[in-house]
Image (spheres, rainbow, N blue to C red):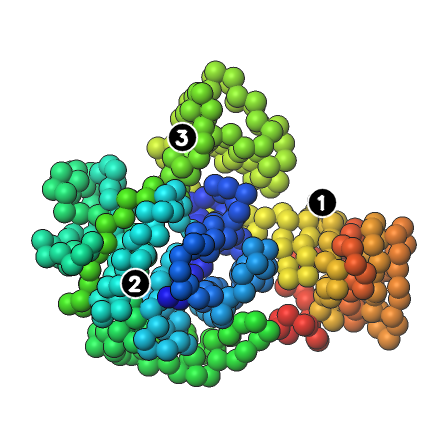
Amino acid sequence: MIPVILSGGSGTRLWPLSRGQYPKQFLPLVSERTMIQETVLRLNGLKHIKPPIAVCNEDHRFMLAEQMWEIGVKPASIILEPVGKNTAPAVAMAALSVASDDVLLILPADHVIADCAAFHQAVIAADTLARQGQLVTFGIVPTQPETGYGYIQRSQSQQGEAFKVAAFVEKPDAETAQRYIESGDFYWNSGMFAFKAGVYLDELAKFNPEMLQVCREALQSAQQDLDFTRIGKDIFSTCPADSIDYAVMEKTANAVVIPLDAGWNDVGSWTALWDVTPKDDSGNAVFGDVLAIDTENSYLYSKDKLVAAIGVQDLVIVETDDALLVATKDKVQEVKAIVDFLKSQKRSEADLHRKVYRPWGHYDSVDNGERHQTKRILVKPGAKLSLQKHHHRAEHWIIVKGTALVTKGDQQILLAENESIYIPLGTVHCLENPGVIPLEMVEVQSGSYLGEDDIVRFQDQYGRV
């Protein structure tokens, strides 16, 4: 069985922690591990599990690769989507890259599953059914009449631990959800699946041949870039966008659902995250430097500053280095409206944290003015930034820790701690850490425009030219 990790989704309802360039699946929200790391580690103990295939947005590729490296996992491949087209094309490309008889286990990267033993039992049952030609989905045994999930209706026809699927249904209103729960025939739609690669492709050929053809052409023309399979944007942009549910599972005659009661949660909102997080005696989920007095049933998160809450209840308070969210728990679904507004105003807080991660390390914008900006920069040992120039800004670099090898025009200069260098506007330059410890430096930019898009790259070892 080959796990296919779907690392899509922007997680906007968990803003300001989750951002477009650093979405929730790459954050440690429920443990010391990130959600995508937990998704992969959850498979430990299952027999005959092969290295995973990951499908992700190309902007997230280095985060994914590094987080897999941190837990000692080397994916069989990392397929990069130049544009998001939902789950059906993503899974099609994974299926096209393996043998027809291989069983794929499709796992979104942002789920919480508390009971791994129950999850393993369901996966083993799904593997057996998938090898018999069934397309298996996992239906979550509901605990309440939830209106935020789609549902799967089972038929009375049973195959081992599974039931034939009678219907997939949209997110219901409260009254309909209550009726679903009372009937006992409905499960929450988990978005997890298991099937043979060839069976999925055969069904996709029946119901959406255009999608399959585009995916086939896109994969055939893909280029290998380091550890990544880079799909061509021109071809993939023409692909119809659809979910596995709509494209295949709702139409096939071979869909079965395995009930799964394993403490599942897709952590789609701050309230959902509060639900799965350990709490104090007052029902508060507390992270970081937080002082809570006469406060109940709240989610309180501090990244940098002391957060003090007095005499409140049922609130979500999340502090990051550049934003503060305060919301009642029954209004957290509306956080998406905040993100939409930030995007409409072209504000960076919609997509980026103040600290921005790059394949070579990270930078933190600690001060900004009309014509100046100051950053703290960390470059990993052996890493190298692109050979580049800027049209609108000059830069001063001050080495705080480690050693820097600087290319400045035709010169190469080695700088140690407490040394500095000036890079004039328009000068071709490059920064490299030749040492064995992280290079830490302060960069002061000055000029008429200080945006990150004022970069002309000439060479780059990370494929960004």
- Circles 3 and 2, Cβ within 8 Å, touching? The answer is no
**Rendered residue at 45%/20% (across/down):** 281
Tag 2 residue: 127
Quadrant housing the C terminus? bottom right
**Rendered residue at 63%/47% (across/down):** 354
Q: Which amino acid does label 2 sit on?
A: Asp
**Rendered residue at 88%/60% (across/down):** 415
> On the picture, is 118 further left or further right than 427?
left
Disc number placed over residue 328 in the picture, else none: 3
Category of crowding for the residue at label 1, using alpha-carbon neighbours closer than 10 angstroms: few (below 14), some (14–19), many (at least 20): few
> On the picture, is 219 further left or further right than 144?
right
> On the picture, is 440 further left or further right than 345?
right
- Give the x, y percent position of residue 428: 78, 71
Can residue 252 be seen at all in this image of the molecule?
A: yes
Disc number placed over residue 85 in the picture, else none: none
Q: Spatial distance from mark 3 to mark 2, Cα to Cα? A: 42 Å
Q: What residue occupies the far left of the structure in this picture?
A: 156
Q: Which amino acid does label 1 sit on?
A: Asp
